[in-house]
Image (cartoon, rainbow, N blue to C red):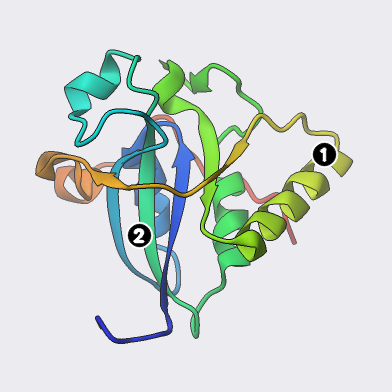
Amino acid sequence: MENNTNIKKAYFASGCFWGTEYYFMKAKGVVHTAVGFMGGHVDHPTYEQVCQKDTGHLETTEVEYNTEETSYEDLVKLFFETHDFTQTDGQGPDIGPQYLSCIFYSDEGEKNIALRYMEILQSKGYKVATMLKPAYIFWKAEDYHQQYYEHKGSTPYCHAYKQIFD
């Protein structure tokens, strides 16, 4: 898999990374997920540091996907359909700057796809709070956060799937 040019990475922040990862790890074409932090000014942040709300990091899910089985566009749609992208202070009951909605894009193509879907949502009457930022260093969270719901055998409390796009 290391040399497979069809494998790409995408980065999404939509509240608690456990719920975000839950939906992405089940998506067609996704080969691996990891949860961690992105967007802040602290190197190698711990979960405890990020929870103190002053690192600038967002809880982020790294999604590795096979471009022969799914597209970045499909991932962006899933991102918007699995959280409240209109919430400005967190996600569901999780309030704080680390829980904000953001797509971290790796190139102009990804940025343009994200912008197109944000415009589609706005045309449907939604007030989109999702931020768009360039991808930076992804800092992987501690092992006990990885595939959390899979290991716990439960489902997210702050994320739910709601079809928006056809």
x and y percentages locating residue 64 in the rendered image:
37, 66
User: Quadrant of the image for the N terminus?
Assistant: bottom left
Residue at the image position 47 percent from the left and 49 percent from the top: 135
Three-letter amino acid code at the position of disc 2: Met
Residues at marks 2 and 1, CA–CA distance in whole angstroms: 27 Å
The answer to whether residue 83 is above or below residue 73 is: above
Pair 2/1: label in front? 1
Q: Secondary structure at mark 2?
A: helix
Residue 83 makes an appearance in the image: yes
Q: Is residue 143 left or right of residue 164?
A: left
x and y percentages locating residue 57 in the rendered image:
37, 29
Q: Secondary structure at mark 1?
A: helix
Residue occupied by mark 1: 122
Sequence-first tag of 2 and 1: 2
x and y percentages locating residue 111 in the rendered image:
65, 55
Q: Residues within 10 Å of mark 1 (few under 14, many from 20)?
A: few
Q: Quarter-wise, where is residue 109 in the image? A: bottom right
Residue at the image position 25 percent from the left and 81 percent from the top: 2
User: Quadrant of the image for the C terminus?
Assistant: bottom right
Residue at the image position 44 percent from the left and 64 percent from the top: 27
Three-letter amino acid code at the position of disc 1: Gln
Q: Is residue 134 left or right of residue 151?
A: right
The answer to whether residue 142 is above or below residue 7 is: above
Residue 156 makes an appearance in the image: no
Tally of numbered discs: 2
Residue occupied by mark 2: 25
x and y percentages locating residue 85 in the rendered image:
62, 34
For the residues labelled 2 and 1, say whether their Cβ atoms are less than 8 Å apart. no
The answer to whether residue 78 is above or below residue 91 is: below
